[in-house]
């Protein structure tokens, strides 16, 4: 192979290598954009998770308060029922 032909072949290889490099750089640039979008989405998901956790903690606290109130109402109703039964039993004993 003479010198002009070898230079021509080298230039062809160089052009192909530059095309590959350009394609790789473009792909990398697209990947960087996608990665940035994914990071933003992950941050939004973390914020949502934090908000949901806070709301869940509040709901659990309210649920415990309601459970306590329900138990207190049941206790008072039982006591009231016992008082009514005692009154009715006393009234029945006097009438009999």
Image (spheres, helix red, strand yellow):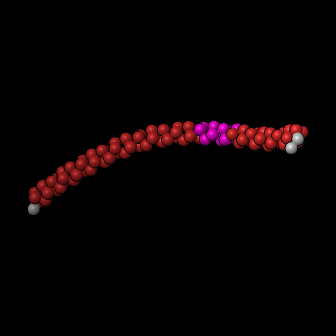
The reply, left or right, for residue 22 in relation to residue 62 is right
Task: Kindly indicate the quadrant of the structure image that contains residue 24.
Answer: top right
Could you tell me which residue is drawn at 48 percent across and 38 percent down? 50
In depth, the one of 33 and 13 nearer the eye is 13
The reply, left or right, for residue 34 in relation to residue 72 is right
Task: Kindly indicate the quadrant of the structure image that contains residue 19.
Answer: top right
Which quadrant, please, contains the C terminus? Answer: bottom left
Could you tell me which residue is drawn at 59 percent across and 38 percent down? 39
Which quadrant, please, contains the N terminus? Answer: top right
Residue 68 percent location from the top left of the image: 30, 44
In depth, the one of 82 and 34 nearer the eye is 34
Q: Is residue 62 magenta?
A: no
In depth, the one of 53 and 2 nearer the eye is 2
- Furthest toward the bottom, the residue is 96
Magenta segment's dominant SS is helix
Residue 6 percent location from the top left of the image: 85, 41
Q: Is residue 30 magenta?
A: yes
> Disc count in the image?
0
Does the image show residue 44? no
Does the image show residue 74? yes
Residue 37 percent location from the top left of the image: 63, 40
The reply, left or right, for residue 95 in relation to residue 3 is left
Could you tell me which residue is drawn at 56 percent across and 40 percent down? 42
Magenta extent: 29-40
Could you tell me which residue is drawn at 61 percent across and 41 percent down? 38
Residue 75 percent location from the top left of the image: 24, 48
The reply, left or right, for residue 91 in relation to residue 44 is left
Figure check: 82 above or below 23: below
In depth, the one of 38 and 9 nearer the eye is 9
């Amino acid at each position: 192979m003479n010198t002009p032909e070898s230079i021509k072949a080298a230039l062809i290889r160089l052009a192909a290598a530059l095309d590959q490099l350009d394609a790789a750089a473009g792909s990398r640039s697209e990947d960087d954009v996608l990665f940035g979008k994914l990071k933003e989405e992950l941050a939004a998901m973390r914020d949502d998770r934090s908000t949901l956790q806070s709301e869940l903690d509040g709901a659990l606290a309210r649920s415990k308060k309601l459970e306590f109130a329900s138990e207190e109402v049941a206790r008072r109703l039982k006591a009231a029922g016992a008082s009514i039964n005692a009154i009715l039993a006393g009234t029945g004993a006097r009438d009999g």
